Amino acid sequence: MEAAAVEQVRRFNRTVTQRIGALEDEYMARERSLGLARVLWEVGADGADVRQLRERLGLDSGYLSRLLRTLEADGLVVVAAGRGDGRVRTVRLTPAGLGERRELETRSDELAASILRPLSERQRARLVEAMAEVERLLTTSMVAVAPLDPRHPHARHCIRAYYEELAGRFPGGFDPGRSISAADDELTPPSGVLLVATLHGEPVGCGALKFHAGAPAEVKRMWVAPTTRGLGLGRRLLAELEAVAATAGTTVLRLETNNTLHEALQLYRSTGYEEVDPFNAEPYAHHWFEKRVSPRPPRLPGEPAGEGDAVG
């Protein structure tokens, strides 16, 4: 990684933290830090599960507990056991907390306006556009991709969402029982692998491989959540699968897809997959693809691979 790029990121971080007042002990003159204000805002009017709050903010459990204790001592939140499961803790705003959150909303709007006000109309448009792009790329950098047992709840969520989307997009619906199998045991090493992408601790995509001794491996279950499309996650999952296959000694990958999945077709064609004659009897397929991969060392965990999304 280039030193100049790292330095630019650091300069950007310093500028942003200073401009928004993150260095001040009392964020927006409300007698509490930015961390406390952010937790208060994230709890929201409907409350939040403490575990989900921790995942969403990326905070250590001990540090979040200290922040919540401070807010509780100030009479702004109440932390209690969840209904139906005493192991789950929830946090809700008190009436005073709701009032403080409304004040933070007002002051946050004023702070945002103060950033835009000194700029010309053209400069404002440029800044807002640049901020949207930075937000998108930062979100992309927070997505984690890792192998997961197909029986894990996150894996189950992704596969279920994959089936539901295909059922909605295929003209005649989708019946997994008619499709070529990709069962749990087929996606568990050494028979195969399932990669699951998570963002803030929640599953947002998946992709799988089925290995066959002495034969090409199959790419299966490619899916990206609608909320994270546009982040290049489909292309990243595909690249991760190719790296896993190459590391396992596989030299050829195969996949098939339906002609209604336009984004999948575009992704596969743009990443070097060549259309070939049908090599199986998948009833939902209209296109069959193949790609040769060269053995290579695995990429660093989490290293991005480019742009592109797909369900296929």
Image (cartoon, rainbow, N blue to C red):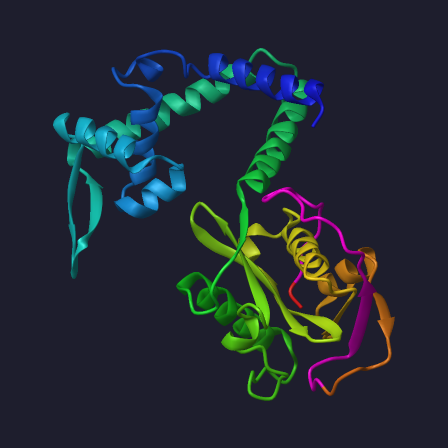
Q: Is residue 246 above or below residue 125?
A: below
Above or below, 89 against 219 in this view is: above
Image quadrant where one finds the N terminus = top right
* Rendering coords of residue 236 (x, y %): 66, 51
Report how many numbered discs are placed on residues in the image: 0
Report x, y in % for residue 89.
20, 48
Q: Where is residue 309 in the image (x, y as percent from the top left)?
A: 67, 55
In the image, 304 versus 106, the foreground residue is 304
Q: Is residue 295 magenta?
A: yes
Residue at image position (53%, 70%) is: 188
Front residue of 127/9: it is 9
Q: Which residue is drawn at 37% across and 21% down?
A: 107
Residue 30 percent location from the top left of the image = 27, 17
- Report which quarter residue 207 is drawn in: bottom right
Q: In which quarter of the image is residue 24?
A: top left
Q: What stretch is highlighted in magenta?
A: 282-310
On screen, 104 above or below 153?
A: above
251 or 75: nearer the viewer: 251
Residue occupying image coordinates x 51% and y 76%: 185
- Of residue 236 and residue 251, the one placed in the foreground of this image is 251
**Dominant SS in magenta:** loop
Asked whether residue 259 appears in the rendered view, the answer is no
**Where is residue 6, by image quadrant?**
top right
The quarter of the rendered structure image containing the C terminus is: bottom right
Residue 179 visible from this viewpoint: yes
User: Left or right: where does residue 118 sit relative to residue 122?
Assistant: left
Q: Is residue 32 left or right of residue 156?
A: left
**Which residue sits at x=69%, y=61%?**
245
Q: Is residue 60 one of those drawn in magenta? A: no
